[in-house]
């Protein structure tokens, strides 16, 4: 899948869109050998935002507390000093207006990057997202497009109060017209933010807040994109495919390493990274190779994105399966307060059990 | 702006904070302002109000300290705002309902919630949210503004059952007035003329967003006009003024005079002296001298001085109260820290009866706990 503008499409359109070539700036992070700096995931988001603000005057950052305060997670720290209050904008407390005005801004020719302070508080913006952002292109028969981004910290594990720990990716993935990505590493975070900003469609960037400061890695200094729609194989393996994203990628990798050391079990860990569009080819190829699969996500099990992946496996690789696909997920309950969070999250113990169960089946 | 006039409101002439069109009863030195009257509260009631304020201040200090020691989760301080919280609750009758936010600890306590329960949920136990049957309060609201239409609905339902029975008092901040829910809720309340008292605790900040950046109007109270509800602006650091205007609003809500509208929007002007929450660092967005004007507006000192002037309070009584407050908090903290929970509780109350799926998920979790023990659930690498 290519996120670069399709020339035939702009020919149909009346709009004059200068779509930066995302593909041209995509780099292979595995083979990259240029200058790097060590960044946490939240610093990488900021770096990605800063570089896009610098390269394109139409890019704007807006949201609650994103300016002077630099965002409650510091994802926009110092950006207002650098780009001024007209490019990095503190808004009143109004999610619906933040997303709704972003839709208007995008139609006017700007590239707004809106922040929802927490995914749990994005609900008031849902009408704007699903009734309008998702379908402006199709509704206007391609006349109006929305090159806009909505960033949302999501997920649990930081002992936060109620409504601060939700993982509602399924609701967004279900909306045709929205793209949904979620990085699990600093390098991906920087590249996905850039790709999202340059994308001609509305892209939701879900940022796993548990990973914001969990670790650092060397991130290319230059500006680059990570293509939307491509999964990343974090660990190659032959015995079983573990599909996951966001904060669950870390425990999934830890389990894979442990099982390799203990049982010689070779687990492939696929970080889907882009939940919409889904990288069906990588999912299918992985299962065709390993014959077994486990899906891990933090969101509740029922009607979660995991169900979509299991269905995709059925469609693309059923006859390669040697065991039913297992889901290891959050429960069908609200995310509990801190004392019970460890029991809710699909952490290493449950992932490991899910893998062993699938191998033994 | 204020349409409230009983007792005769006294407007401060010099412009300090809060602004001079806000209703005041006490001067900052604790004397009655010229023309102002002591609200209809007995000496005993005034002492109770004072004790409630001292308790609130100490709770705030203790909770902040407990959070720093990692004994409770994120806490939203209320320093400087206790006067408004306590006085609004004092103006309610037991049968009236309170709809609070995450910052209204003292309002909740003054309306019957225990500090132990508050500390329990702050310690990460949902059990602390459970409201006893004899307390008419909803659990606190965290998503901003959402409580406004709900409070209206609660009041609407009550009037359908008995038009003079109960009032509903709903708290929110200045930030909340930018949400759609605020406007939708006020409009409904006015259209259906229901007994709701909307209290905007305007503490001048919504995290890092100062009041001037929240709205281009000069006041919050002027928004009342747009919906046809009565608006009153009050000095939120003057507990007696807050009590007086809220009490009048409650009376009117339940027993409106001919042609009088039931809902009221009260803008209670205050200043958030502390951080937004224990996860917030105000030095990133406000200068150190911001809010300096408000420093001498301490609601507790203000009432304390008044009580001393009136001979209602003396040093001995103040010491006695301070001791009682310490004991009360020590007990609340001990009890909250002794709370026990169980992972199975997570599956309770999602529905009246757990679904088959939930039962299955619970059984899976129980199996894992039996085989591996609860310690095995701690996240790796965290
Ligand atoms: C709908 C929603 N958006 C964002 C947040 C995150 N948030 C929590 S408190 C807050 C500021 C609220 O300010 P205000 O309404 O003035 O109340 P205060 O905290 O000052 O008492 C924000 C933005 C939230 N809780 N709910």
Image (spheres, rainbow, N blue to C red):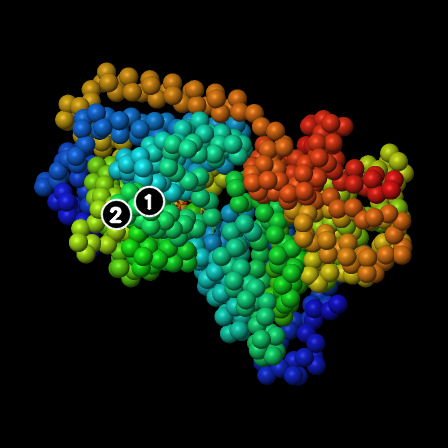
Q: Which residue extends farthest left?
A: B35
Question: Could you confirm whether marks 2 and 1 are on the same chain?
Answer: yes
Q: Is residue A131 visible?
A: yes
Q: Which residue extends farthest front?
A: B161
- Nearest to N terminus: mark 2 or mark 1: 1
Residue B7, position as x, y percentages in the image: 14, 42
Who's the residue at 77% across and 43% down the image? Answer: A253
Q: State left or right for residue B84 relative to residue B311.
A: right
Determine which residue is flagged by label 1: B168
Who's the residue at 81% across and 49% down the image? Answer: A325
Q: Is residue B154 above or below residue A313?
A: above
Q: Secondary structure at mark 2?
A: helix
Residue A61, position as x, y percentages in the image: 52, 60
Q: How dense is the environment of label 1, judged by Cα within 10 Å: few (below 14), some, or many (20 and up)? A: many
Q: CA distance from mark 2 to mark 1?
A: 9 Å
Residue B290, position as x, y percentages in the image: 34, 45
Q: State left or right for residue A207 relative to residue B205.
A: right
Who's the residue at 42% across and 20% down the image? Answer: B330
Q: Is residue A250 above or below residue A54?
A: above
- Look at the numbered disc 2 and say if its residue's Cβ is closer than 8 Å to ligand 1: no
| Nearer-the-camera pick, A57 or A272 | A272
Who's the residue at 76% across and 48% down the image? Answer: A295
* Mark identifier at residue B253: 2
């Amino acid at each position: 899948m290519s996120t670069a503008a399709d020339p035939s499409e702009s020919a149909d359109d009346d709009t004059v869109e200068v779509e930066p070539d995302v593909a041209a700036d995509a780099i292979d992070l595995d083979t990259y050998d240029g200058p790097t700096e060590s960044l946490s995931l939240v610093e990488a988001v900021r770096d990605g935002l800063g570089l896009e603000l610098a390269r394109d005057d139409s890019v704007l950052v807006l949201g609650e507390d994103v300016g002077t305060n630099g965002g409650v997670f510091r994802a926009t720290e110092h950006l207002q000093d650098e780009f001024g209050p007209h490019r990095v904008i503190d808004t009143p407390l109004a999610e619906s207006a933040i997303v709704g005005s972003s839709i208007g801004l995008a139609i006017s020719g700007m590239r707004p990057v809106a922040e929802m302070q927490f995914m749990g508080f994005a609900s008031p913006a849902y009408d704007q997202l699903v009734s309008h952002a998702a379908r402006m292109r199709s509704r206007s028969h391609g006349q109006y497009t929305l090159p806009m981004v909505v960033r949302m910290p999501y997920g649990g594990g930081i002992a936060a109060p109620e409504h601060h720990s939700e993982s509602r990716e399924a609701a967004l993935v279900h909306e045709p017209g929205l793209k949904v990505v979620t990085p699990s590493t600093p390098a991906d975070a920087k590249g996905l933010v850039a790709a999202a900003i340059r994308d001609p469609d509305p892209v939701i960037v879900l940022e796993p807040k548990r990973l914001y400061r969990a670790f650092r890695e060397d991130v290319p200094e230059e500006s680059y994109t990570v293509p939307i729609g491509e999964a990343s194989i974090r660990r190659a393996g032959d015995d079983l495919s573990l599909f996951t994203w966001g904060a669950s990628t870390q425990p999934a990798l830890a389990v894979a390493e442990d099982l390799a050391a203990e049982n010689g079990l070779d687990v492939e860990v696929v970080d889907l990274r882009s939940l919409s569009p889904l990288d069906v080819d990588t999912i299918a190829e992985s299962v065709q190779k390993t014959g077994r699969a486990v899906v891990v996500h933090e969101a509740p099990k029922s009607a979660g994105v995991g169900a979509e992946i299991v269905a995709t496996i059925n469609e693309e690789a059923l006859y390669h399966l040697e065991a039913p696909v297992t889901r290891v997920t959050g429960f069908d309950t609200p995310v509990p307060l801190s004392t019970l969070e460890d029991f809710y999250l699909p952490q290493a113990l449950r992932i490991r059990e899910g893998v062993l169960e699938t191998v033994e089946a | 702006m204020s349409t409230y006039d009983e007792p005769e409101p006294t407007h401060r002439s010099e412009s300090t904070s809060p602004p001079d069109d806000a209703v005041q009863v006490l001067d900052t030195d604790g004397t009655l302002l010229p023309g102002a009257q002591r609200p209809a509260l007995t000496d005993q009631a005034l002492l109770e109000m004072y004790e409630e304020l001292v308790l609130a201040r100490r709770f705030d200090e203790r909770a902040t300290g407990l959070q720093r020691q990692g004994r409770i989760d994120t806490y939203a301080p209320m320093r400087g705002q206790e006067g408004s919280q306590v006085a609004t609750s004092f103006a309610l009758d037991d049968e009236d309902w309170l709809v609070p936010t995450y910052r209204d600890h003292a309002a909740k306590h003054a309306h019957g919630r225990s500090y132990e329960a508050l500390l329990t949920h702050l310690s990460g136990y949902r059990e602390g949210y459970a409201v006893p049957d004899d307390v008419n309060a909803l659990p606190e609201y965290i998503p901003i503004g959402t409580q406004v239409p709900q409070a209206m609905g609660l009041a609407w339902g009550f009037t359908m059952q008995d038009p003079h029975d109960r009032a509903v008092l709903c708290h929110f901040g200045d930030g909340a007035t930018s949400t759609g829910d605020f406007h939708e809720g006020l409009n409904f309340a006015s259209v259906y003329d229901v007994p709701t008292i909307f209290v905007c605790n305007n503490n001048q900040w919504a995290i890092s967003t100062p009041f001037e950046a929240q709205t281009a109007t000069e006041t919050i109270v002027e928004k009342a006009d747009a919906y046809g509800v009565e608006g009153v602006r009050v000095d939120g650091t003057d507990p007696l003024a807050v009590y007086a205007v809220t009490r009048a609003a409650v009376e009117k809500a339940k027993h409106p005079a001919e042609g009088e509208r039931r809902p009221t929007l009260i803008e209670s002007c205050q200043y958030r002296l502390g951080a937004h929450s224990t996860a917030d660092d105000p030095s990133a967005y406000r200068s150190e001298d911001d809010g300096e004007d408000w420093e001498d507006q301490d609601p507790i000192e203000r009432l304390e001085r008044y009580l001393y002037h009136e001979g209602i309070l003396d040093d001995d009584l103040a010491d006695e109260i301070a001791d009682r407050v310490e004991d009360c908090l020590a007990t609340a903290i001990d009890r909250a820290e002794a709370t026990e929970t169980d992972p199975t509780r997570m599956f309770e109350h999602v529905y009246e009866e757990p679904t088959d799926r939930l039962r299955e998920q619970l059984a899976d979790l129980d199996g894992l706990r039996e085989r591996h023990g609860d310690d095995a659930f701690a996240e790796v690498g965290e």
